[in-house]
Amino acid sequence: MTSQRTLNRLFTLHSWAGIVTGLLMFIVCFSGAVVVFKNEIDLWANPSLAQLPRAEKPAPLDTVLAQLHTHYPGATVETIALPDAVNPSYFAFVRERGAPANTRTKVALRSDTGTVVGPVDSQLGQYLRMLHVFLFFGPRWIVGFLGVAMLVLIATGIVIHRKILAELFTQRWGRSFRVVMSDLHKSAGIWGLGFHILIAATGAWMGLAPLFEQGFKYVTTTSTEAAAPKPARKAEGSESLDAMYATAQQAVPGLEARYVSLRRWGTSTAEASFTGNLQNHLASTARVDILAATGVPKKVHDPRTAGFWSLVNGLMEPLHFGDFGGLALKWLYFLLGMTPAFLSISGTLIWLDARQQRRREADAAQPAAEEVAAAG
């Protein structure tokens, strides 16, 4: 049985943790609930893209790259995003010659022919993701610590409100504002408890993952990267993205690339990185880096064979954003994701109302104390 003194301390910790992180917690939770529809938002903000045809077999990557070089001569193609279940088109991030170092152009291309459609007008979905993941100014570990704070709030809330089943259906609408908000706060927290633990734990992990990975590598002596198979050496100057993609799929069976990143393209040290999901598997961090001149994999990362922690890390993003179960799961994540945003608001309102109540009681007690002192 938890003592009353311990409960009071946990209540104080719960209150101040919520007050200190309340605004940032609301921003992160609200943007996170909306960002599950990132791709749908981008299509909504760019209605012409939604009307583009969806190819059963997308155009070759080499064709896409050739089209980009034709329409943007002298520009650097940094990343190509492949069509997926939501987006019917190719997208590419291009850094044009003379543009500022932090300025990139997002270009849409038809998936059936690889023809350049033009720059994307709005990246609203991506801006929301940047707000959720980095709070625009980063670094990501700030959001990771907010995930830890959310776990603290959950743990202390569970201990403080021990009558979970009774409070699950308790809502006293006819009482004071603080009582009504308190009942809503507790019932919303209890109904979404499992989801809140999932979101807080995965968010904390992804935000602090680099720290965990560095510590794990320091403690262990084995590499977390799988040994790269070495296919037959190709002729110098080979820069076929489609051939390299085939090699990447041989290195990591079941790889479904979402992004192709190009580094130092056109030089003797050019590399292409294929990053994406695994067929019939939830992990989303599979990656193969290939030397363009030889077509030989430089680094292979298959989360299924790279160790326990690597597999855990690969599962975090799908579980956090709910992008593996179609539109129905996204709506579920959206509805449940709004509850932490509500909890941050309701908790702040409850704290402010309690503070005002204490102030009113103190003001009311002041004259009585002065009368007692005068009578004495």
Image: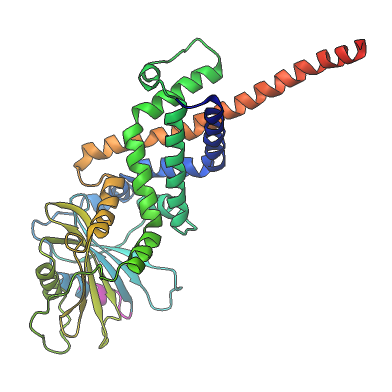
- Identified at 8% across, 56% down, the residue is 56
Q: Is residue 233 left or right of residue 188?
A: left
- Identified at 77% across, 16% down, the residue is 365
Q: Quadrant of residue 89?
A: bottom left
- Identified at 23% across, 38% down, the residue is 329
Q: Is residue 127 magenta?
A: no
- What span is in magenta? 67-74
- Residue 150 image point, x, y percent: 44, 41
Q: Is residue 70 magenta?
A: yes
Q: Quadrant of residue 201?
A: top left
Q: Number of labelled discs?
A: 0
- Residue 314 image point, x, y percent: 25, 56
Position of 88 relative to 232 (above/below) = above
**Figure quadrant of the C terminus:** top right
- Residue 209 image point, x, y percent: 36, 58
Position of 63 relative to 166 (above/below) = below
- Most common secondary structure along the magenta stretch: helix
Q: Nearer the viewer, residue 333 or 55?
A: 333
Q: Nearer the viewer, residue 89 or 313?
A: 313
- Residue 258 image point, x, y percent: 22, 60
Position of 34 relative to 289 (above/below) = above
Q: Nearer the viewer, residue 233 or 71?
A: 233
Position of 243 relative to 371 (above/below) = below
- Identified at 35% across, 19% down, the residue is 165
